[in-house]
Image (cartoon, rainbow, N blue to C red):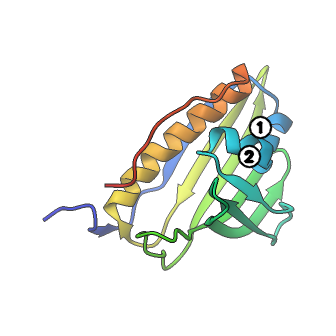
Amino acid sequence: MNDGNERVVPPDLVYITFIRTTPQKLWDALTNSALTTKFFFGRSVESDWAQGAPWRMLTPEGLLDVKGVVLESDPPHRLKLTWRVDWTGEAPPEPEPAIITYDIEANGDVVKLTMTQHTESAIPRKYVKAGEQGWAAILSSLKSLLETGEPLVIKMGPPQ
C-alpha cells in the first residue's frame, strides 16, 4: 500500500526563479520577519544570521514551527541552514535535519534565486509532497512581493 505515511528519502528539491530586485532586498526578505510574515504563510524568523547561530521560525500564533543552525552566511549571496520541523501536531521529528540553501546571484536588473532542500533521512511521503507544493507557493509569493509590493495569497491545507 502506498499511503502518505510511507517513509522515503526524497531527492533534492531545487527551485530556480528570477526576481526583479537586488540581492540585498532578497536577502532582507529571507531574514527579516517584517517581510517573511508577508510571503511565508505568516511565519516570522529569528536569528542574528551569523554562521553557527541558531535560528527559528514561528507560526502567526507564536508557536515554534522550524528551528536550526546557520551553516553558512554570506550576505547577500548565500544562506545555508539546517531545517528541523518542530510542529506540535502530527509531524514526526526527522532523524536528521534537512539542509536549506539559498543562493542569490545578481544577473543584470534581476536576481537569480536558487533554493535547494537536501534531506538525507526518510520522511513520510505526504511531507515530501507538501514540501514540494509549499516551496513553490512560498517562492512564488516572495517573487510577487518583491516585484509588486504584494504577496500572493495561496490557500493550502495540511499534508495528506
In the displayed structure image, the side of residue 108 where residue 6 appears, left or right = left
Relative to 44, residue 98 above or below: below
Which residue corresponds to mark 1? Answer: 26
Q: Crowding at label 2, few (<14), some or many (≥20) Cα neighbours within 10 Å?
A: some
* Quadrant assignment, res 147: top right
Kind of residue indicated by mark 1: Leu
In the displayed structure image, the side of residue 71 where residue 144 appears, left or right = left
Image coords of residue 76 (percent x, y): 84, 44
Q: Of residues 124 and 57, which is closer to you in this image?
A: 57
Q: Is mark 1 on a helix, strand or loop?
A: helix
Quarter of the image with the C terminus in it: bottom left
* Quadrant assignment, res 41: top right
| Residue 50, label in figure | none
Q: Residue at x 21, y 62 (%)?
A: 3
Image coords of residue 14 (percent x, y): 52, 46
* Quadrant assignment, res 108: top right
Which residue corresponds to mark 2? Answer: 30
In the displayed structure image, the side of residue 158 where residue 106 appears, left or right = right
Q: Residue at x 77, y 62 (%)?
A: 72
Relative to 136, residue 51 above or below: below
Image coords of residue 1 (percent x, y): 12, 65
Relative to 77, residue 99 above or below: below
Kind of residue indicated by mark 2: Leu
Q: What element carries label 2?
A: helix
Q: Residue at x 32, y 61 (%)?
A: 125
Q: Of residues 72 and 47, which is closer to you in this image?
A: 47
Q: Which residue is drawn at 80% across and 48% down?
A: 32
In the displayed structure image, the side of residue 37 where residue 130 appears, left or right = left
CB under 8 Å between discs 1 and 2: yes
